[in-house]
Image (spheres, rainbow, N blue to C red):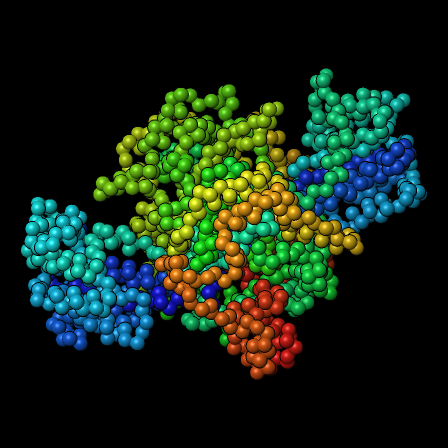
């Protein structure tokens, strides 16, 4: 990657005794704030996988350890990639009983940076000072240090106690502003005279060196969120055409693309450091479950129930070829023909003129403005590189103050559209009343996100895409950081910073509560519980939507169920709550045996598969027993055919424990001895139960498969 | 090597949150075809009614295979001399059982259709007028109910050209009518596809169908079958999506005020059907299992013996598998209202993923419909959109969404053309937005913009997604069909995404040149090497001047050398893949060892052991 993007940072942390002398009534002491800031800076660097190097200098340390031999300043960590040890070191920092000169520390830091970065390439070098400035300073050094910072091109950043903005402004602007800034603000009052002198000096230095100052209250919230590392934009260069003659050299850049978290890797829990490899095997579905070679596996597609092998030759001969890389405008259409909900694809591209090609820039600019003024968009075909799938998309004009571009967004093909028709929501009988509409109006007015006042009284736009971070990603990073620091501790509950992200800024306002209360009053909202007679609660508030296909009221169409039957709680199918009773009731009613059996089988499978531990095993075993007994009388083949699949499922889903139960209770195949109708010999039935050993390999099923993967398999 | 940020291949890897499999409900359809003599008389078109019926069966099967391959189709003939069905109902023959269609069934029909006449058919099945419609309907009913699989709908398409089959037998007519009423009771639908110009439905069939449908109004008319035939004979290469919500969740306004909504996906990419893996020798499906091994000992690892980790700053951060899953449980499934924003503030270019759609769901909370209606009404009136966190199910993480209100729209005949509800539009988080350092320096002047306008106005058309078929999918379906049915020729698929240069040139005429003259200076070649004259200042770009990184091992010569030295193993997986891909060799799912082998094989060099 871009080598030039590497930074060298020296962090100076004040641990001197004066930091503890600061008024105690402050919620968080200086050192605690400082520790948090530095720790977060380091963690952010670690997670961003940057190549930045960081050094740590303690100000006011008991020992002295620096090249210049300035007293009570020590280089705790020399320049290197940030490590967890460093984070631990920072989090363990304790106050000392000595003080040191922070200007000395800056001198040490600059000198250190100069020494340490010789021969290494860094794009930027920074010194970050965290001090409350409450120490005696030798002002005589100031000019030297300013000179040094400038000549070394070091960026100076100071993170410190809260500083009143207006005063800061005042001082920064005032040329000889030194001591004229105790104007009655509380925060200022609590500062010692020494601090005030220090602050004024610091401002002077920062102004001279183009440095930055940031209070804890500004820095902490910003630092608490992990950032994604910037990816250097890579252009996709192509010549866009509009008809055969008009051609414009453009570049596409990904502007929005769903951010992903680093993926999890697998390791052994038994042996630290052991590598784990995975291997896919291909198994013929015959009696012996023969494993076959990858080379003997070919691809095919299903045509109805027919499988059509599709060889490489077929592939080469018959595949669709989209042709060369291209970006062709097919025509232009009105903006309103391309409504937002049609947008496809993940993210968008910015299309700009190729860099350095001002002719293309002019041509593209004319097109952008023409589209903008005519309220039109272009429809274009994009082939990323030779023979990749052709993508259809719209090009929207975007004119910003700094740049102009076309925004490319994918559009659907006819096959991607699903035409569902929905009934009207409002009918004559359920029209909302004026009062009801007004109550919603009130809520809308109160919950405006355009101008939200924060706790400091600043007004801003809430949940702006540019500034809102992904709460899940933050949660993962916080948890990773915690585990890195505390390998043996349980993961703590969701961090407050993450919880705050999930809250509406209006949530605690009285006016909001009143508005919601009014809606509650205006609308009759009753939770529906009646259906639970037929389905377990878990099915209504579905744990996994994937179960829907299996568990939704399947065999009886709900519209067939009359109100009366709902009240009577007639059994409509075998459920997981009382499977045996349901099963018997349905048979008594003369329902089709095949159907009821297959319901029962499904229920047993679900009970076992979705059992937490062995919770449902007893119930499943009883149900299995009932099913087997009934089948012995009615139709053994229904049980025998199914139990083989059931066994496979148990092993596949890592539910061997239930298999053991089944074996123990002898609930295997129904043999011809048990039922004359069975074609299974005694020997076969016995062998069936001895299955375990030979099938051991099968048991390894990736437990961590996502629900999504499971879905794909279903 | 960095992963290319341009990977445009299908990679539906990460959270498919709302892409939950929409498990298809099966429909059952039986073609009940009259096989009495009149059906075999050739009409003016040169085709007999029986032939047309079989053609309908065939196209329906072909369409079903693509559109909803779970559906079951059967063909039953009545009025045959031969009796061939499980219930031994006289003069009824089952041509094809009610099953999912496959290639053999279609081939059987094709063979019948290819014959010049139906003499063979007559020889095998014969004709007889001694049948009863009631028997035929009864067999259909029994076929449906003995189906092992649950059927969502049951339909019978009845093909005949005899308008009064039971003339003279009141008894048979009566039986047929009472059977028809039975079918109506158990939700079996019957459609009549009558043929012949002089067919008089009022003699028998009109009442029969009315009984099935339970519609006894006087003005009920049998629909004209001709459009139905057109539909049945039209080829459709499109997956049919049954209306099904991907989840029913609660929408929370806060403080315990909640209502129910159902989530639908109205637009999602249709993929080429999933491949099946087959055994080369038997062409049967093979099962795959992935097992984890200890890399050194080769010992099998059980799921309980595995952990998950990520490595940062040279430290493995270890999580138990259940802990990684628990991380995802940040929010409960549902929609949580955060506030409202003016609709105009939702930026077009803030697009992250295809949207979903929500509609009130009374099944969770009674009264949802009304609150939903009020919210929709007020959002439309005030031109605001709710901003929410959206967690579609327990395994998904919260997404920031804008709910774009959509008002119901009806066409002139009161048929819904736009459904009421909210579109759930995903908004990006800051992490999803990339910083681009772009700056425009040269802008077009008024004249150039006028020239561009002239061009775009000439190329206007009305866009609808329905005018663009996916050429890749269409090609795929037609190819699979050709292979399955042993067709020798492939049907050519017209690629509608390719611009029609000829017509564009005609429409633009001289405007194209005028535009080019206005924006380009003579001799400029788009995409050619840009001149680097002094007046073009690029202030923002720091890396564009860097020479392009030469791709390692990009050309065959290099690889040849490497392979002759037997050092292919030393290359990285990415490099191997790039090379193989460049040579047009499939690399998906291959492990390094396999990749290395492929390289040697490809170059015809013996692999050192």
Q: Does any portion of residue B353 appear in the rendered image?
A: no
Q: Quadrant of residue B135?
A: top right
> Percent x, y for residue A419?
59, 37
Foreground pick, A335 / A592: A335
Instruction: Classify A377 as above or below B532.
Output: above
**Quadrant holding the N terminus of chain A:** bottom left
Q: Quadrant of residue B196?
A: top right
Instruction: Classify B318 as above or below B18.
Output: below
For the point 54% across and 32% down, which residue is it? B419
> Percent x, y for residue A421?
58, 33
Foreground pick, B583 / B175: B583
* Left or right of residue A37, residue A549 in this image: right
* Left or right of residue B357, residue B560 in this image: right
Q: Does any portion of residue A138 appear in the rendered image?
A: yes
Instruction: Classify A673 as above or below B317.
Output: above
Foreground pick, A131 / A317: A317
């Amino acid at each position: 990657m871009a080598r030039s993007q590497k930074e060298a940072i020296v962090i100076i942390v004040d641990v001197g005794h004066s930091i503890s002398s600061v008024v105690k009534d402050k919620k968080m002491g200086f050192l605690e704030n400082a520790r948090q800031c530095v720790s977060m800076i380091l963690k952010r660097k670690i997670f961003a996988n940057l190549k930045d190097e960081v050094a740590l200098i303690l100000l006011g340390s008991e020992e002295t350890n620096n090249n210049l031999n300035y007293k009570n300043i020590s280089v705790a960590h020399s320049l290197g990639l940030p490590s967890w040890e460093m984070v631990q070191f920072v989090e363990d920092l304790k106050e000392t009983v000595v003080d040191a000169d922070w200007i000395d520390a800056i001198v040490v830091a600059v000198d250190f940076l100069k020494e340490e970065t010789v021969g290494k390439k860094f794009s930027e070098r920074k010194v970050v000072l965290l001090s409350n400035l409450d120490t005696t300073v030798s002002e005589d050094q100031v000019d030297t240090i300013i000179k040094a910072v400038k000549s070394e091109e070091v960026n100076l950043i100071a993170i410190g106690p809260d500083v009143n903005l207006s005063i800061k402004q005042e001082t920064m602007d005032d040329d000889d502003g030194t001591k004229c800034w105790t104007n009655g603000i509380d925060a200022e009052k609590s500062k010692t005279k020494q601090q005030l002198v220090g602050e004024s000096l610091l401002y002077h230095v920062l102004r001279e060196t183009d440095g930055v100052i940031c209070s804890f209250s500004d820095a902490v919230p910003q630092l608490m969120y992990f950032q994604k590392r910037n990816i250097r934009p890579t252009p996709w260069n192509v010549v866009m055409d509009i008809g055969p003659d008009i051609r414009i050299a453009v570049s596409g850049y990904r502007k929005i693309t769903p951010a992903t978290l680093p993926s999890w890797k697998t390791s052994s829990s038994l042996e630290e450091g052991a590598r784990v490899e995975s291997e896919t095997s291909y198994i013929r579905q015959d009696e012996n479950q023969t494993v076959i070679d990858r080379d003997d596996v070919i691809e095919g597609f299903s045509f109805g129930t027919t499988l059509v092998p599709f060889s490489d030759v077929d592939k080469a001969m018959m595949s669709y070829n989209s042709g060369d890389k291209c970006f062709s405008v097919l025509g232009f259409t009105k903006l309103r023909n391309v409504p937002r909900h049609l947008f496809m694809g993940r993210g968008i591209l910015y299309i700009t003129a190729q860099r350095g090609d001002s002719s293309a820039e002019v041509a593209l600019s004319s097109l952008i403005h023409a589209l903008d003024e005519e309220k039109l968009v272009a429809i274009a075909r994009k082939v990323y590189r030779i023979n990749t799938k052709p993508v259809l998309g719209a090009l929207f004009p975007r004119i910003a103050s700094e740049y102009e571009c076309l925004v490319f967004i994918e559009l659907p093909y006819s096959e991607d559209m699903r035409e569902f028709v929905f009934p009207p929501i409002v009918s004559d009988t359920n029209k909302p009343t004026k009062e009801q509409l007004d109550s919603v109006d009130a809520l809308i007015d109160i919950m405006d996100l355009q101008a939200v006042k924060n706790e400091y009284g600043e007004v801003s736009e809430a949940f702006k895409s540019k500034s809102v971070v992904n709460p899940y990603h933050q949660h993962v990073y916080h948890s990773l950081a915690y585990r890195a620091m505390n390998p043996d501790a349980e993961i703590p509950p969701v961090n407050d910073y993450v919880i705050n992200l999930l809250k509406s800024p209006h949530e605690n306002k009285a006016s909001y509560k009143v508005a919601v209360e009014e809606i509650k009053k205006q609308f009759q909202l009753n939770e529906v519980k009646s259906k639970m007679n037929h389905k377990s609660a878990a099915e209504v508030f579905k744990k996994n939507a994937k179960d829907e296909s299996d568990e939704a009221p399947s065999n009886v169409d709900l519209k067939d169920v009359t109100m009366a039957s709902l009240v009577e709680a007639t059994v409509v199918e075998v459920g997981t709550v009382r499977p045996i009773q349901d099963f018997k009731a349905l048979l008594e009613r003369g329902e089709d045996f095949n159907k009821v059996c297959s319901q029962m089988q499904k229920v047993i499978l679900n009970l076992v598969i979705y059992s937490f531990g062995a919770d449902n095993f007893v119930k499943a075993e009883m149900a299995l027993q009932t099913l087997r007994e009934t089948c012995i009388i009615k139709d053994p083949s229904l049980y025998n055919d199914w139990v083989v699949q059931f066994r496979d499922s148990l092993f596949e889903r890592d539910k061997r424990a239930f298999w053991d139960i089944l074996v123990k209770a002898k609930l295997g195949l129904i043999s011809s001895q048990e039922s004359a109708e069975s074609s299974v010999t005694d020997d076969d039935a016995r062998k069936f139960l001895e299955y375990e050993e030979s099938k051991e390999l099968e048991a390894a099923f990736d437990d961590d498969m996502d629900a999504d993967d499971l879905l794909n398999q279903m | 090597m960095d992963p290319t940020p341009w990977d445009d291949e299908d990679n539906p890897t990460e959270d498919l949150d709302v892409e939950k499999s929409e498990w298809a409900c099966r429909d059952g359809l039986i073609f009940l075809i009259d096989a009495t003599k009149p059906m075999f008389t050739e009409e003016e078109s040169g085709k007999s009614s029986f032939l047309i019926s079989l053609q309908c069966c065939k196209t329906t099967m072909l369409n079903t295979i693509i559109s909803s391959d779970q559906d079951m189709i059967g063909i039953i003939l009545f009025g045959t001399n031969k009796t061939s069905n499980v219930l031994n109902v006289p003069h009824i023959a089952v041509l094809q059982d009610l099953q999912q269609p496959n290639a053999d069934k279609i081939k059987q029909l094709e063979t019948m259709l290819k014959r010049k006449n139906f003499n063979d058919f007559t020889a095998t099945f014969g004709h007889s007028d001694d049948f009863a419609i009631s028997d035929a309907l009864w067999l259909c009913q029994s076929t449906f109910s003995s189906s092992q699989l649950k059927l969502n709908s049951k339909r019978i398409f009845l093909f005949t050209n005899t308008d009064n089959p039971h003339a003279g037998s009141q008894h048979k007519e009566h039986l047929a009518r009472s059977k028809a009423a039975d079918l109506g009771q158990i939700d079996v639908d019957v459609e009549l596809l009558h043929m012949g110009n002089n067919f008089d439905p009022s003699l028998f069939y009109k009442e029969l169908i009315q009984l099935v449908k339970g519609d006894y109004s006087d003005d009920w008319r049998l629909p004209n079958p001709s459009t139905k035939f057109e539909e049945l004979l039209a080829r459709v290469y499109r997956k049919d999506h049954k209306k099904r919500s991907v989840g029913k969740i609660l929408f929370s306004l806060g403080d315990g005020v909640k209502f129910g909504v159902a989530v639908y996906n109205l637009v999602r990419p249709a993929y080429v059907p999933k491949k099946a893996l087959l055994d080369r020798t038997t062409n049967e499906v093979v099962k795959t299992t992935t097992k984890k091994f200890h890399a050194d000992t080769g010992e099998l690892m059980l799921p309980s013996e595995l952990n998950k980790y990520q490595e940062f700053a040279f430290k493995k951060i270890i999580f138990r598998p259940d802990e990684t899953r628990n991380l995802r449980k940040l929010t409960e499934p549902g929609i949580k209202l955060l506030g409202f924003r003016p609709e105009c503030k939702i930026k077009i270019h803030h697009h992250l993923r295809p949207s979903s759609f929500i509609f009130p769901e009374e099944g969770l909370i009674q009264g949802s419909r009304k609150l939903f209606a009020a919210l929709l009404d007020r959002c439309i009136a005030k031109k605001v959109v709710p901003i929410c966190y959206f967690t579609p199910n327990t395994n998904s993480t919260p997404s920031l969404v804008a709910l774009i209100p959509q008002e119901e729209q009806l066409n002139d005949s009161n048929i819904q053309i736009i459904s009421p509800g909210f579109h759930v539009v995903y908004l990006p988080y800051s992490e999803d937005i990339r910083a681009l350092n772009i700056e425009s320096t040269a802008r077009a002047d008024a004249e150039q913009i006028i020239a561009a306008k002239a061009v775009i106005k000439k190329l206007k058309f009305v866009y609808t997604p329905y005018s663009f078929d996916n050429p890749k999918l269409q090609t795929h379906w037609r190819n699979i069909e050709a292979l399955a049915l042993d067709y020798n020729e492939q049907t050519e698929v017209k690629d509608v995404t390719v611009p029609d240069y000829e017509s564009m040139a005609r429409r633009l005429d001289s405007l194209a040149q005028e535009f080019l003259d206005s924006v380009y200076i003579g001799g400029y070649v788009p995409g050619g090497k840009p001149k680097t004259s002094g007046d073009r200042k690029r202030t923002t770009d720091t890396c564009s001047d860097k020479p392009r990184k030469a791709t390692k091992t990009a050309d065959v010569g290099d690889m040849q050398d490497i392979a002759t030295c037997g050092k292919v193993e030393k290359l990285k997986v990415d490099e191997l893949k790039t090379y193989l891909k460049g040579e047009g060799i499939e690399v998906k799912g291959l492990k390094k060892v396999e990749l290395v082998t492929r390289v040697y094989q490809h170059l015809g060099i013996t692999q050192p052991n």
